[in-house]
Amino acid sequence: MKNPIIIWRGGVAAALALGLALSLTGCAIGSPDPSPTDTVSQSASASSSLEPSSSGSGEAVEGRLDYDDQADWQFISGQMQSPIDIVSADAQPMAEGGGAIQLDYATDPTAMENNGHSIEVADSGSAIIDGRSFTLTQFHFHAASEHTIDGQHYPMEAHFVHKAADGRIAVLAVFFELGEANPGFREVLDEIMPMQYDSTIPHDPPAFTDLMTMIPTDLSYYHYLGSLTTPPLTENVEWYVMKTPVQVSADQVTDFAQLYSHNNRDTQPVDGRVVLDHQA
Ligand SMILES: [Zn+2]
């Protein structure tokens, strides 16, 4: 089990509920209900439970994942894997009036970690997704992007990982395109660059001033049900892939690549899953 590096400034109840989840490595965490659903409203009815994927379960991946040997990653589930290539012309419009996302992220991250396969920032705050409450647990970054749109990668993709009280996981994915430097990502890099690779030393960073520059103002998205993109690759994770990218400079991508030159999982078969298109 990794050192519990999280210093939780939020409520005690939340800390108890999320303490396990926050100490995990990986793209996201938990053990969602295996029953597949296709829409936001349907998925809201599914349930799940907190389950640590740390070394206690034998499923954790400590340290660096080998992204050049993904075929050897441990699989515990089947046909609803992430990431995927999103074919924009095949996405089905979501019913009007549903699916809205409201974000209220905390600007004071509770911990930051170079976990061996990404920069991971523990943060709190809330998200209302289609009328359901989630808590932000952490966010991290992949280069190149994990999802593709019509076969095209972006240079980077951020994953904001949320968890509901019932354990359900929702990940908000944001593409980074080349352009202006991203102030929020600069804050992350400035804190993480001096840290040792594979550092498990607690690092209590200063408050963000530009966190929301890593989130597009237009919260239109593609939605589908998939999985964690790192072992244990658990399924029935709700994905909300933002259609509008934010900008990142080439220098920032280069800085990130000094830490992780390739930490994106290959796209997985869609296998008949429906991708919904939500217009904010
Ligand atoms: Zn991820």
Image (tube, grey):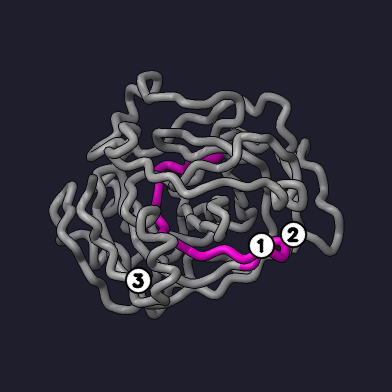
Check the image and report above or below for 186 versus 163. Answer: below
Frontmost residue, 146 versus 73: 73
* SS under mark 3: loop
Instruction: Using a 10 Å C-alpha cutoff, classify the residue at mark 2 as few (fewer than 14 neighbours), some (14 to 19) or many (20 or more).
Output: many
Q: Amino acid at mark 2?
A: Gly
**Image location (x, y in percent) of residue 4:** 24, 57
N-terminal of the two: label 1 or label 2? 2
> In the rendered structure, which disc, 3 or 1, sits on the residue that comes first in sequence?
3
**Which span is picked out in magenta?**
128-147
Q: Quadrant of residue 172?
A: bottom right
Q: Which residue is mark 2?
A: 99
Q: How many marks?
A: 3
Q: Residue at x 37, y 41 (%)?
A: 53
Which residue has dot 3 on it? 109
Counting from the top left corner in percent of width and height, residue 46 is at 67, 46
85 left or right, relative to 21: right
Can the viewer see residue 29 in this picture?
yes
The answer to whether residue 220 is left or right of residue 190 is right
Placement of 63 over or under 73, stated as above or below: below
For the point 56% across and 59% down, the residue is: 164
3 and 1 marks in contact (CB < 8 Å): no
For marks 2 and 3, give the CA distance.
27 Å
Ligand 1 contact, mark 2 (Cβ < 8 Å): no
The residue pinned by badge 1 equals: 129
Name the residue: 62% across, 66% down.
133
Residue 59 point in image, percent of width and height: 35, 33
Secondary element at tag 2:
loop
Question: How many C-alpha atoms fall within 10 Å of the one at disc 1: few (<14), some, or many (≥20)?
Answer: some
